[in-house]
Image (cartoon, rainbow, N blue to C red):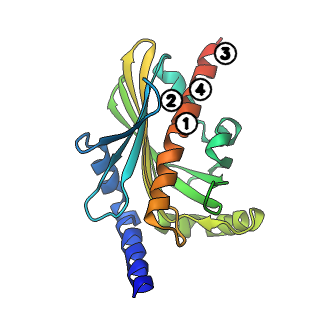
Amino acid sequence: MTIFYYSIHLLLFSFLLSYDNSPKLLSTMFDREGWQIVSQHSDSLTVYKKNLKDIPIPAFKATMIASLPMEHVISAILDGENHEDFMGSSHVVESNFIESPLKDTTFVYQMLDLPIISNRHYITKNYNDTVKVDRHYRLNWLIDSKQNDLFFNDYIENKSEKHGDPIFMENGAGSWEVEYISENKVSVSYIVLTDPGGWIPNGVISYVNKKLGPDTVIMMVEEGRRRYNNRK
């Protein structure tokens, strides 16, 4: 009975994170109500969680206040082709743009060498929102399983063979949110809710999401700072 219940529990979670619901999930995560502080890594870096209705694990958000102009952080976030070069300790070992069949939409393949759980890879569908020009941007991603199957089936099979058959993630959504504070100060947030697939307890999924968020934000901000310091 325990195994049966756990199976239904995971299937329910996968259904709720399916393609049809990912944009709605993002909208819910953008709502600033309901976020609770779970850890304070420094005066400038805070981790939050938010419980979403009918979903058994929380969303996480890591927010960092950084002293640099916002355009350099945005440049780093958008440089998906090179994330493995400066995001290594966030466990990204391969990151590539894939030729997109859709206008104004990009697709990025990433391979993760993860702690605790086995390796994962995935393809994200990416689009940007301008909340306020020169002041507030969201760089959103979601895993669109239907379109991945439709457009990239052969690509996924080739990558699976290359990387030793890691689990291909089918459900997830998240966003980089970048907000102007002043000419040389910016707020950078990484919001994420993912189902890594496989038979993993929800507590472990929450732990991984909670741990990777702050590291990911720190590395992205550091790359933005490097680009700012190396500007011509």
* Residue placed under numbered mark 2 in the picture: 74
Mark number for residue 222?
Answer: 4
Which tag, 4 or 3, sits closer to the chain's start? Answer: 4
Identify the residue at image location x=54%, y=23%: 72
Which mark lies nearer to you, 1 or 4? 4
- The location of residue 101, given as percent across then percent down, is 54, 56
Q: What is the CA distance from the residue labelled 2 to the residue labelled 3?
A: 15 Å
Per the model, the C-alpha gap separating discs 1 and 4 is 14 Å
Of all residues shown, which one is farthest toward the bottom? 1
Q: Secondary structure at mark 2?
A: helix
Q: Mark 4: few, some, or many residues within 10 Å (few <14, many ≥20)?
A: some
Mark 1, residue position? 78
Disc 4 vs disc 2: Cβ atoms closer than 8 Å? no
Residue tagged by mark 3?
A: 230
Looking at the image, do the residues carrying marks 1 and 2 touch, with CB atoms under 8 Å apart?
Answer: yes
- In the image, residue 79 sits, relative to residue 18, either above or below, namely above
Q: Marks 4/2: CA distance?
A: 12 Å
Whether residue 224 is visible to the viewer of this picture, yes or no, is: yes
What is the count of numbered marks? Answer: 4
- Whichever of labels 1 and 3 marks the residue nearer the N terminus, that label is 1
Residues at marks 1 and 2, CA–CA distance in whole angstroms:
6 Å
Mark 1 belongs to which amino acid?
Leu
**Mark 1 and mark 3: Cα distance apart in space:** 18 Å
Amino acid at circle 3: Asn
Q: Choose the circle earlier in sequence order: 1 or 4.
A: 1
User: Residue 154's quadrant in the figure?
Assistant: bottom right
